[in-house]
Image (cartoon, grey):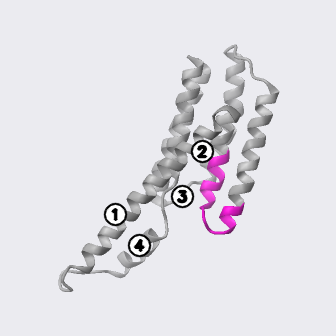
Amino acid sequence: MTANIILIIFCCLMIWAAISDVRYFILSNRLCISVALLYPIFLAALYLDGFQVTLESIGWSIGISILIFSFLVFLFARGYIGGGDVKLIPAIALWAGPSRILEFILITTICGGLLALLIISFRYLKNYISLHKSSEKINFSMSESAESDHEENNIPYGVGISIGGLYIAYQLFQALN
């Protein structure tokens, strides 16, 4: 029962991540640290609820998370991924563990990719429509132009990551009940 409450908190953090990334393109350090620090609390709750938690599975979870973090730091250095994504994915990977990590990566990739395609298509359509309007009807202010440039370079991939995290929470809930 205690573990279920912690899973609900984890789900709330995933929703917070998605909203934060959509609104501000930010996955805060506080959020990522909260997700990571909630994991040992979840393990303690599992133990208190009578589930067996092995050091081997904990070690594998930590090792996989470190490996993923290392790879994502490389992608961040190349400019392919944001810093918040680099921190949040390994934090969720702790929760996924070795048995669910591939599912997490697959769902995150599919959802993030579909979101990226949707946003790119929407931006293309928006630009196409604005190019075909008469010059009298187009009224751009400086702030709208700057905001547009900021939007053009960002995809809120935290939404896909959060959906992957919610899937992991659902799988853990199913395993517990």
In primary-sequence order, the first of circles 2 and 4 is 2
Q: CA distance from mark 4 to mark 3?
A: 15 Å
Magenta segment, prevailing SS (helix, strand or loop):
helix
Mark 4 is on which residue type? Glu
Mark 3 is on which residue type? Ile
In primary-sequence order, the first of circles 2 and 1 is 2
Q: Please, which residue is most extreme toward the bottom here? A: 135
- Crowding near the residue tagged with mark 3, few <14, some 14–19, many ≥20 C-alpha atoms within 10 Å: some
Give the side of residue 56 with respect to residue 16, left or right. right
Mark 2 is on which residue type? Ile
Q: CA distance from mark 2 to mark 1?
A: 25 Å
User: Disc 4 on helix, strand or loop?
Assistant: helix
Residue occupied by mark 1: 122
Q: How many marks?
A: 4
Residue at coordinates 66% horizontally, 52% vertically from top-left?
Answer: 87
Indicate which disc residue 147 carries: 4
Magenta stretch bounds: 74-90
In primary-sequence order, the first of circles 3 and 1 is 3
Residue occupied by mark 2: 105
- Crowding near the residue tagged with mark 2, few <14, some 14–19, many ≥20 C-alpha atoms within 10 Å: some
Residue 31 in the image: state x and y as whole percent: 60, 47
Q: CA distance from mark 2 to mark 4?
A: 31 Å
Give the side of residue 172 with respect to residue 66, left or right. left
Residue occupied by mark 3: 26
Q: CA distance from mark 3 to mark 1?
A: 21 Å
Would you say residue 78 sits in the magenta stretch?
yes
In primary-sequence order, the first of circles 4 and 3 is 3
User: Disc 1 on helix, strand or loop?
Assistant: helix
User: Disc 3 on helix, strand or loop?
Assistant: loop
In the picture, the quarter occupied by the N terminus is top right
Q: CA distance from mark 3 to mark 2?
A: 20 Å
Residue 162 in the image: state x and y as whole percent: 52, 44
